[in-house]
Amino acid sequence: SNDPPSDTQAQRLNSFRASCRGEVDVLDDRIADLNAELAWLLDQRSLRESQAAVCSSLLSPFRRLPTEILGEIFLYCLPEARYRTASRNQAPLLLGQICSRWRGIALGMSKLWEEFTMHIN
């Protein structure tokens, strides 16, 4: 109704309001605890994902390819122009940026470097 509550009703309403506020405080504390646990779980998940990615990288079939096969693949990666200009975005310079093994293979293959021109500004 639109009538103001009686004294007894007002006492009950004040008591109920205080009880609700107490429960809200308890719920806020629980939510904070759960948020902290969620943050920890997300950190753990991210850590495990990165560890799994490292394992996948170490188990990559490319690591088991013989040097001779990689060298042949590298030759197929060369631009087709007769006189090639060296570019960091193309083979063989690009291949040398993948990992130290690939860099060593690329540097050791004279066929990769034949017919390249270098422009020095």
Image (tube, rainbow, N blue to C red):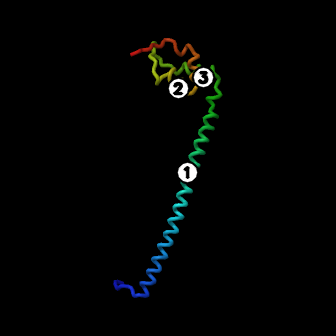
Residue found farthest to the left? 2
Q: Amino acid at mark 2?
A: Gln
Q: Is residue 115 left or right of residue 47?
A: left
Q: Residue at x 46, y 83 (%)?
A: 12
Q: Amino acid at mark 1?
A: Leu
Q: Is residue 121 left or right of residue 63?
A: left
Q: Are marks 2 and 1 in contact (CB under 8 Å)?
A: no
Mark 3 to mark 1: distance in Å? 39 Å
N-terminal of the pair, mark 2 or mark 3, is 3
Q: Amino acid at mark 3?
A: Leu
Question: With respect to residue 22, does 90 lie above or below?
Answer: above
Mark 2 to mark 3: distance in Å? 15 Å
The mark lying in front, picked from 2 and 3, is 2
Quarter-of-image position of residue 8: bottom left
Residue occupied by mark 2: 97
Work out whether residue 13 or residue 84 is closer to the camera in this orientation and state it: 13
Residue occupied by mark 1: 42
The image's mark for residue 70 is: 3
Q: Position of residue 101 (x, y in %)?
A: 60, 24
N-terminal of the pair, mark 3 or mark 1, is 1
Quarter-of-image position of residue 2: bottom left
Mark 2 to mark 1: distance in Å? 32 Å
